[in-house]
Amino acid sequence: MPFKHFLIPISLIAAALLWAAGFPTSPAVVASVDLEKVYRSLDQLKASDSRAVELRGSLEKRVTKLADEVRAMQDDLESFQPGSTAHNDALNKAILRAGDLSALQNFAQLKMESEQANAVREAYMAIRSSCAKISAEQKIDFVFIDDTVPTINPTNLEGTMQQINGRRMLYSNPTLDITDLLIERMNSDYRADHPSAGSPAAPASALPGKS
């Protein structure tokens, strides 16, 4: 048999070996995380909430002060003769100040929403980073968000189907859950980076409204 007849089988075997070498020979190691519990338990987010409370208080003081000024200017209008130059000037000033108040109120709302969104985004990025570190240490290949934890809230058919269709997991083995490990690692790292942050976050089960 001519030698060239062996070229195709040999090449196929070589290709199969190369293909097999590109895939892992052992099963993937997976873990799950209760993301809602993580968010409830992070010192990082608790600190962000405290800063948000301070910011809200500061903005509310500014809004209240400006609102008092507008009310005072409106009250002063009664001391002027309607239609007079002084009345018109005071009215224009009151209108401009009221515009400043509206602008400040809009700014305060957008500022609070922006701060809260940034806090959640930064926490999510920190969660991903910590998951990557734990996975490298524990030889974990995939970490899934366990969306089997939240209950299906009573509602109409459409609402129920939306909740069901939003789920991606039907079952999660509790022994594969690394939620507590992730929370402990993240809070420990956060307190190490922020020594003045105070006491550690309360366990999620101890938080108000949670069982």
Image (tube, grey):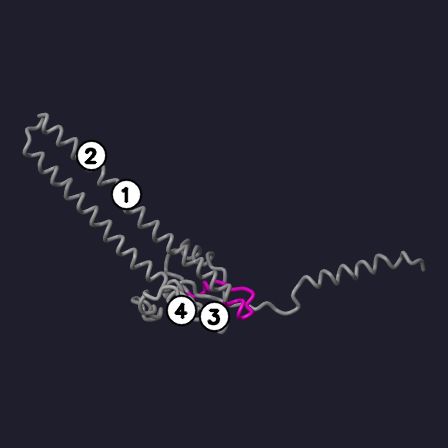
Task: Return the residue nearer the eye: 159 or 34.
Answer: 34
Under mark 1, the amino acid is Asn
Q: Which is in the foreground here, disc 1 or disc 2? A: 2
Is residue 211 among the parts visible in the rendering? Answer: no
Q: Which is in the foreground here, disc 3 or disc 2? A: 2
Task: Return the residue nearer the eye: 169 or 127.
Answer: 127
Q: Tag 3 or tag 1, which sits nearer the N-term?
A: 1
Question: Picture coordinates of residue 78 (x, y %)?
Answer: 7, 34
Which residue in the structure is indicated by mark 1? Answer: 106
Which residue in the structure is indicated by mark 2? Answer: 96
Is the residue under label 2 in contact with that under label 4 (CB below 8 Å)?
A: no
Is residue 77 among the parts visible in the rendering? Answer: yes
Which residue in the structure is indicated by mark 4? Answer: 188
| Identity of the residue drawn at 39% across and 67% down | 192
Which residue in the structure is indicated by mark 3? Answer: 177
Tally the numbered discs: 4
Q: Tag 2 or tag 3, which sits nearer the N-term?
A: 2
Q: Tag 3 or tag 4, which sits nearer the N-term?
A: 3
Q: Which is in the foreground here, disc 4 or disc 2? A: 4
CA separation, marks 1 and 4? 38 Å
Segment colored magenta = 134-149
Q: Is residue 24 magenta?
A: no
Q: Which is in the foreground here, disc 1 or disc 3? A: 1
Image quadrant assignment for residue 13: bottom right
Under mark 2, the amino acid is Leu
Is label 4 in a helix, a strand or a loop? Answer: helix
Q: Residues within 10 Å of mark 1 (few under 14, many from 20)?
A: few
Is label 2 in a helix, a strand or a loop? Answer: helix
Question: Picture coordinates of residue 211 (x, y %)?
Answer: 34, 70
CA separation, marks 1 and 3? 43 Å
Under mark 4, the amino acid is Ser
